[in-house]
Image (tube, rainbow, N blue to C red):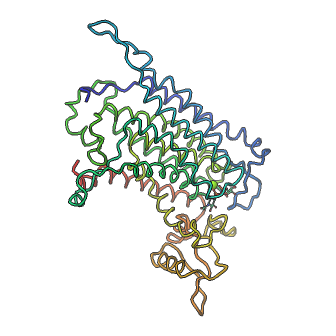
């Protein structure tokens, strides 16, 4: 363990912030400028919840992805500017060469590779409407470069067992290969979960924006404040141990310098993410002048998987996905064919009042016993609403199983803008809950 935490390379950090401002301006400007070209290329969609049926440019997440990846590539030399300028060091014996941090470069490049695959997949999905069974494995394959780098870094695969379960499993459990399977599933989950929580103006991009801001706040907790001081480790005392992951992982042996570097890496990837999302949101806000398409869902989802895996906070990251996890679990009966799944599950609009109501899935055939049991349970829990046959009680219709329909069921009909605001509030509340669990409650079941 090194005796010091080196100061944060401020020029690199400021460059990242500067690039992000450029990225914001670029998305703000380019999206409307290329709209007509997208429509000409048949990348367009009809807004399902408006009376006006003029086509809106679709898949404009491609612009976000392009700007995002471009700035990440331009940033590479700056991310390593410290190593480039300090490649040699004077010692008592003469001049010694400081080794270039190749592992950090491979972390950065493999992340770019995964982001590029996600962009390609998302765009192909927009153009060809790829089938579910083909869509699911691709992000898993795209995560292989990340996992290989994780392995090469001797990434941790242990989890700390909560105190009440220690008499069974001991303090630490090595999940080994299971941990790698978990991380590759994380990339599939992150990419697809935004895509199935979609269909109202601003929904996809607002989720990405709020999660990116949450990740940045989490990263800031790990930087050595004040940023331009060299901090002797002994001054940090216990704080370093607790934050290094005494709570969640067994990464303590790394010392804090690595921890700072990993969270800086995450910051470098999240600052431009916030920028392109904010720029896109301006045009996607109700009434939308641009649609994100699957490209935006995939590239943003993959960016979160990348930072979660590479900066070793995938479990904390998952806590920021509470609304998406809820929506996914609720959607399972429809995704796995137990309940009919129409092409669009977006809420239904009543054009007279301009209010949204839950949309319904229609049973063409009577549901199986298993489907009936699941739907009756969900209905008893207040998660869906059923229409049953007046005489024999078979289910005829069920509200589509999405969090958006759930909000409309519980809070009553509302307009599209209000619904996206409710979704954003739930995302913010989810993040606040995540911070409480991660830094507050974890102390109750783990000894930090
Ligand atoms: C996913 C959802 C589907 C939802 C759709 C909406 C699942 C399994 N699939 O499908 O239920 O209806 O996203 O995006 O949950 N659109 C709007 N307003 C918006 C955004 C999109 O009307 O703010 C419409 C447009 O017609 C647009 C279309 O949705 O063309 C895009 O749908 P697409 O992304 O292709 O649907 P999926 O991702 O396959
Ligand atoms: Mg979609």
The front one of 103 and 12 is: 103
Q: Residue at x 59, y 44 (%)?
A: 118
- Furthest residue to the front? 177
**From this viewpoint, which residue is outermost toward the bottom?**
391
Q: Position of residue 304 (x, y in %)?
A: 48, 45
Q: Where on the image, by quarter, is ligand 1?
A: bottom right
Which part of the image, by quadrant, shows the N terminus?
top left
Residue 8 appears left or right of 60: left
Residue 98 in the image: state x and y as whole percent: 37, 17
Residue occupying the far top of the picture: 94
Q: Is residue 307 above or below residue 74?
A: below
Q: Position of residue 155 (x, y in %)?
A: 37, 40
Residue 399 found in image quarter: bottom right
Residue at image coords 28%, 7%: 93
Q: Is residue 242 shown above or below 55?
A: above
Q: Nearer the viewer, residue 352 or 45?
A: 45
Closer-to-camera residue (206/301): 301
């Amino acid at each position: 363990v090194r005796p010091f935490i080196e100061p944060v390379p401020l020029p690199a950090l400021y460059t990242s912030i500067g690039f992000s401002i450029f990225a914001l301006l670029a998305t703000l400007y380019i999206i409307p400028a290329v709209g007509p070209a997208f429509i000409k290329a048949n990348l367009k969609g009809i807004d399902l919840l408006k009376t006006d049926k003029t086509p809106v440019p679709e898949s404009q997440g491609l612009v976000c992805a392009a700007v995002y990846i471009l700035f990440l590539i331009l940033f590479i030399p700056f991310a390593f500017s410290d190593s480039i300028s300090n490649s040699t060091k004077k010692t008592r014996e003469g001049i010694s060469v400081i080794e270039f941090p190749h592992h950090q470069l491979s972390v950065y490049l493999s992340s770019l590779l995964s982001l590029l695959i996600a962009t390609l997949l998302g765009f192909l999905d927009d153009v060809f409407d790829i089938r579910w069974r083909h869509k699911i494995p691709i992000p898993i394959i795209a995560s292989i470069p990340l996992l290989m780098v994780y392995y090469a870094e001797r990434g941790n695969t242990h989890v700390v067992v909560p105190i009440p379960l220690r008499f069974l499993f001991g303090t630490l459990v090595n999940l080994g290969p299971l941990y790698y399977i978990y991380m590759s599933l994380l990339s599939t989950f992150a990419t697809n979960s935004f895509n199935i929580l979609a269909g109202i103006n601003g929904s996809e991009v607002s989720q990405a924006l709020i999660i990116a801001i949450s990740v940045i706040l989490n990263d800031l907790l790990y930087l050595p404040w004040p940023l331009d001081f060299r901090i002797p480790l002994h001054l940090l005392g216990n704080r370093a141990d607790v934050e290094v992951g005494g709570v969640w992982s067994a990464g303590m042996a790394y010392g804090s310098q690595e921890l700072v570097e990993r969270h800086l890496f995450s910051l470098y990837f999240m600052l431009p993410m916030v920028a392109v999302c904010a720029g896109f949101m301006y045009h996607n806000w109700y009434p939308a002048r641009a649609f994100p398409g699957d490209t935006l869902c995939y590239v943003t989802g993959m960016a979160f998987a990348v930072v979660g895996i590479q900066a070793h906070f995938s479990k904390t990251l998952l806590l920021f996905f509470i609304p998406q996890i809820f929506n996914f679990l609720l959607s399972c009966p429809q995704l796995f064919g137990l309940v009919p799944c129409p092409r669009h599950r977006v809420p239904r609009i009543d054009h007279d009042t301009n209010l949204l109501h839950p949309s319904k899935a229609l049973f063409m055939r009577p549901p199986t016993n298993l489907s009936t049991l699941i739907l009756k349970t969900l209905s008893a829990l207040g998660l869906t609403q059923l229409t049953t046959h007046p005489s024999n009680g078979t289910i005829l219709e069920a509200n589509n199983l999405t969090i958006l329909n759930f909000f409309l069921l519980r809070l009553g009909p509302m307009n599209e803008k209000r619904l996206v605001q409710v979704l954003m509030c739930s995302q913010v509340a989810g993040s606040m809950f995540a911070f409480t669990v991660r830094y507050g409650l974890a102390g109750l079941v783990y000894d930090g």
